[in-house]
Amino acid sequence: MSEQQIIEWIAQDDQRMAALRTARTLALNDWCLAAGFVRNLVWDRLHKHPQNTPLNDIDVVYFNPKELSAEADKLYEQRLDALAPHLPWSVKNQARMHVKYGREPYRSSSDAISYWVEIETAVGVRLNDNDKLELVAPLGVESLFDFTISANPKHGAPAVLLERARTKNWTGIWPSLRIKI
């Protein structure tokens, strides 16, 4: 039920649906809009916020082991900016992100986001060619509904979670959240 609820909330959100349609035009391999794009919406709905919390960025993640340059990501961002300049795009090829953390290469976007700092952040959504929303949630979505910000043991750095929660003011914006290390 939780996954279906998230899909319904996204489908009802005009800005998120427009962002998904825009991102889909890039025809990226194994892509999704992830992190706060999904997480924040769930937390907003659970906290009954009358308006969506503004997104700092829209994380476009994809997986292309044949083109690992950061310049390719910048070109995709420029294309998205041209199509939807009012949205804060951030594009990252997950096929190269393992290097940042000294890990073995990731196998897919889902595998890559399964290592993100918080369990609740490791979720994304894509709009397929048949206009159906598909969740990418390698760690599940249950904790999103538990009012927690949970350290991901696969990431292995709870201090990073604490710093992110503080600088992003998550418990200020969503006061029912509790940090779970």
Image (tube, rainbow, N blue to C red):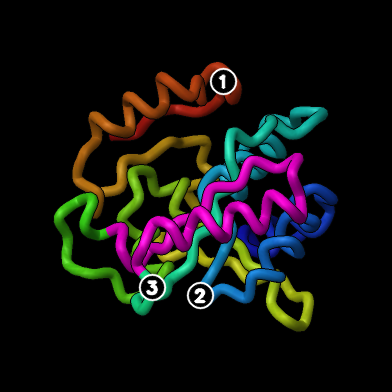
Q: Which residue is mark 2?
A: 30
- Residue 96 lies within the magenta run: yes
Q: Earlier in the sequence, mark 1 or mark 3?
A: 3
Residue 9, visible in the rendered structure? no
Which residue is at 75% across, 28% downward?
49
Q: Nearer the viewer, residue 18 or 90?
A: 90
Residue 122 visible within the image: yes
To which residue does mark 1 refer?
A: 175
Tag 1: amino acid: Pro
Inspect the magenta stretch and tell me whether residue 37 lies in it. no
Amino acid at the residue labelled 2: Asp
CB atoms of marks 1 and 2 within 8 Å = no
Identify the residue shown where x is 78% and y is 76%: 131
Measured from the top left, where is residue 106 in percent x and y? Answer: 28, 69
Judge depth for marks 1 and 2 and give the one in front: 2
Question: Disc 3 marks which residue?
Answer: 67
Q: Which image quadrant: the N terminus?
A: bottom right
Where residue 127 appears, as percent x and y from the top left, is 69, 70
Give residue 39's quadrant in the image: top right
Secondary structure of the residue carrying tag 1 is loop
For image coordinates 43% across by 57% down, the residue present is 71
